[in-house]
Image (tube, rainbow, N blue to C red):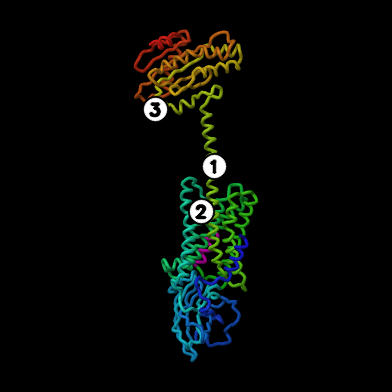
Amino acid sequence: MTTVLSFVMLASLHAAPLGAAESVNIRSSCWMSSSLSDALVTVIRSPGRWTCGDRTYSLEGERTLLRFEIGPDDALPQYLFSRRSALTAVHLLAIDRDGAMRQTSVPAGDLSSALSGGYFKAALPEITRDTREVVVAFDLPSHRMTLERAYLSPSDLVLSPDFLRSLLLLATLAGMLSMPLIFNAAFYRILREPFVLWHSMLTISLLLTILVTSSLAVVLFDPPAMTLSWMTTVIFGLSVACGAMFTHSFIEPGSMHPFLRRALLYCAAWAMLLSTAHAAFPFVGRSVQSTVYTAAFAPVVVIFILSVADALRRGSRAAKFQAVGYMPIVLAGLVRLVTGVVPWLQSSDAMLLFYVGCVCEVLFTTLGVADRFMTIKRERDHARFEADVLERLSERDALTGLLNRRAIEQNFAKFRADGYRTLAVLDLDHFKPINDIHGHVVGDAVLKAVADALQADPKVHAFRLGGEEFVLLVRGEDAQVRAERRRQAIPAVVANAVPGLGRPVTASMGMTDAPPNADAQFAELYEEADKLLYKAKLAGRNRTKAASVRESNHEMDPVFGAVARRS
């Protein structure tokens, strides 16, 4: 991959504008600088002021002039093309062999966008076979690339099959950049993580960059060239800022040094400040502004590289996707940085490498977001599972495994809605002597055996409230009979499970029914059943006192079970 990117980077340094036919294009042969107050005709006719053979252009002068020689075999040019950047006006002069001149001037706001991505165009004065040369004067040019990439051509690009194929490729790339927005919308509805939003913002900014730097914007909207120029600057800053914020929020917590994570925030703000200021005030330090502007992004590139490297060193999984996805874009940034700062190198925006970078960014960072999504989902599912386990444990009695008071209080409305109308409170008779005589180990075994005797089923829920007190919730027409059978089963089950106690273990019970249509509360029913339990204790223990809302109290003695079975 590194080898492929290296070839692409080298190709980007010398790439011609999309669709440009180099065989018919005419490049400048000489240049000079002058002030805005100098008369163009006078300056042009000063041979000693022209610099020929040296294409190291300077922005020191207020006006820069380029001279294009028209050969006898050259196709007659009709347009000037050059890279978009801030300037105030373009003057075009056609000079015939007899010295006749024809001149047109175009204010910057009237310059049209060319179909060649990133270029503007201006119509030349009438060019004939007698035309010897064309002189173009740029007033207050702000970037060397405008001078370096200027050329004359017979026509703009036409909608040829090659051009249509290039548009199709750009549209495909734009479509690829649009797809992650759909995924991110789905991810954000589940995760609500900020890095999903920043990845969407980054994707949108890259999509806008492709739109304004290619021929797509011209075909779709045809905005003025200077409008696209400042939009390109602002959107570039937005892309850098979104990339920094995405890295800041995407790298896992603890996987990046806190200083570097904070530095990414400053980088985002710095990128937006730089691009906005450069777009709004392009002529403040015009002669060096573009160089200073480009160099000012060097700390951003360094901090980004250090951040990803530090995250990789700390074992970040997310950083692996970023390192691969951003490699081409970082290389494109380095090409722009080096060629924009070093005077003797021709400026290059490395658009071919940038487009490759967009593909890699879409592919690998989207995979990274999906991977992070799955990681966070697994972590959340595990946390929810543990929370559910803890919740279930908090509703269970550790000794007997029965549901506890918390379970009945929190879920009583649901139990009532499911038809559980009968509530019974049981208390073991003379349980304290068992602990005193036989020890707490035997006492615990007795409580476990009682829990087995209460045997919950689809119509019965059993609870231990604490100590030797239990509660039954029962539903069905024979609810009271079911509860009484369980109370009477306690002596036999305990005797079988814990032999040698010397006497049977019995229980007293108070039982009440809730009216079917009333919104009875647990505390209300429990209080009534507890009073009935107290009466059963006073009546001699090992018995049940039962009541319903519509009936008076009545007693169920130990033979009630047999009577109920016969009936």
Query: Of tags 3 and 2, which is closer to the observer?
Result: 3
- If the image is split into quadrants, where does the N terminus sit? bottom right
* Residue appearing at x 55%, y 78% in the figure: 61
Q: Residues within 10 Å of mark 1 (few under 14, many from 20)?
A: few
Query: Of tags 1 and 3, which is closer to the observer?
Result: 1
Q: Earlier in the sequence, mark 1 or mark 3?
A: 1
Q: Residue furthest right?
A: 313
Q: Earlier in the sequence, mark 1 or mark 2?
A: 2
Determine which residue is flagged by label 3. 417
Q: Is residue 519 above or below residue 284?
A: above
| Element under disc 2 | helix
* Span of residues in magenta: 270-280
Q: Earlier in the sequence, mark 3 or mark 2?
A: 2
Determine which residue is flagged by label 1. 378
Q: Residue 198 has which mark? A: 2
Q: Main secondary structure of the magenta part?
A: helix
The amino acid sitting under disc 2 is: Trp
**Residue 47 coordinates in the image, percent (x, y):** 56, 87
Query: Of tags 1 and 2, which is closer to the observer?
Result: 1
